[in-house]
Image (tube, helix red, strand yellow):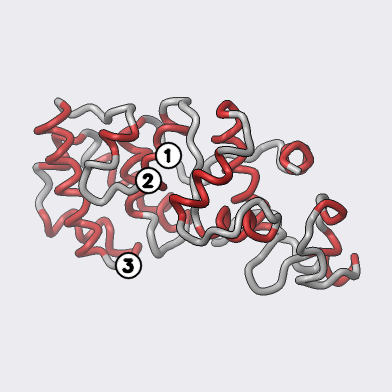
Amino acid sequence: MDRILAETYPDAAAELDFTNAFECLVVTVVSAQTTDRRVNAASPALFAAYPTPQAMAAAPREHLEQLLGPLGFFRAKTDSLLKLSQALVESYDGEVPARLDDLVKLPGVGRKTANVVLGNAFGLPGITVDTHFGRLARRFGWTEETDPVKVEHAVAALFPKRDWTMLSHHLIWHGRRRCHAKKPACGACPIAKLCPSFGAGPTDPIEAEKLVTTQGPA
């Protein structure tokens, strides 16, 4: 199934824009409860003003809130970024650590965010269990777990470690473009014959094709 999804989405990658580990960490943290497109629109001004943990740790709260305003929950996100940046400066000399155990100790960073950073900023294998990944893992019959950590461990046992990061991209892209939560495009799915949940959405190819999107959510 993963091989077919890899062929279907050859460009699968993180849909948040970043140029280094710090930017990857920040955009992933602030992407909660908003869209990648909004984060990508706001991040250039954010990093132009505060390109390093040292700069962001010293940022005036009011200005940071202004920059994060379009993302919603800007006060809470401002708190998260100030505490996160301060922790990086105080505990890691302003460098983003490349170990899961260290990343999850940072304010506002859970396993999902940590695995995004490990896989996409450091090239270290990590499984990112967001809502799409968890939903598809259950639909595919890979696990019945609903807790993200248990889903991560269950799926990790099925795949070689080297595949974890790209597996995450494949499932997330498929979940955003075809295997939607409420109405999956079953009739236009490349792995329909292998999926135990085939029929959860329209099976007619023409009707299903109308549900397919070419990009992730706006």
What's the residue at 40%, 36% (across, down)?
117
Q: Are marks 2 and 1 in contact (CB under 8 Å)?
A: yes
- The amino acid at mark 1 is Asn
Q: Relative to 162, is 32 above or below? A: below
Tally of marks = 3
What's the residue at 28%, 46% (across, down)?
46
What's the residue at 57%, 61% (across, down)?
217
At which x and y percent is residue 132?
57, 57
Q: Relative to 216, is 208 above or below? A: below
SS class, disc 1: helix
- Examine the image and state in which quarter residue 47 appears: top left
Residue closest to the eye, 152 or 85: 152
Badge 2 is on which residue?
111
- The amino acid at mark 2 is Arg
Badge 3 is on which residue?
72
**Which one is closest to the eye, mark 3 or mark 2?**
2
Mark 3 to mark 2 CA distance (whole Å):
22 Å
- Examine the image and state in which quarter residue 91 appears: top left
Mark 3 to mark 1 CA distance (whole Å):
24 Å
Residue closest to the eye, 66 or 79: 79
Q: Relative to 66, is 2 above or below? A: above
Badge 1 is on which residue?
115
What's the residue at 19%, 36% (across, down)?
53
Categorize mark 3 by other alpha carbons within 10 Å: few (<14), some (14-19), many (20+). Answer: some
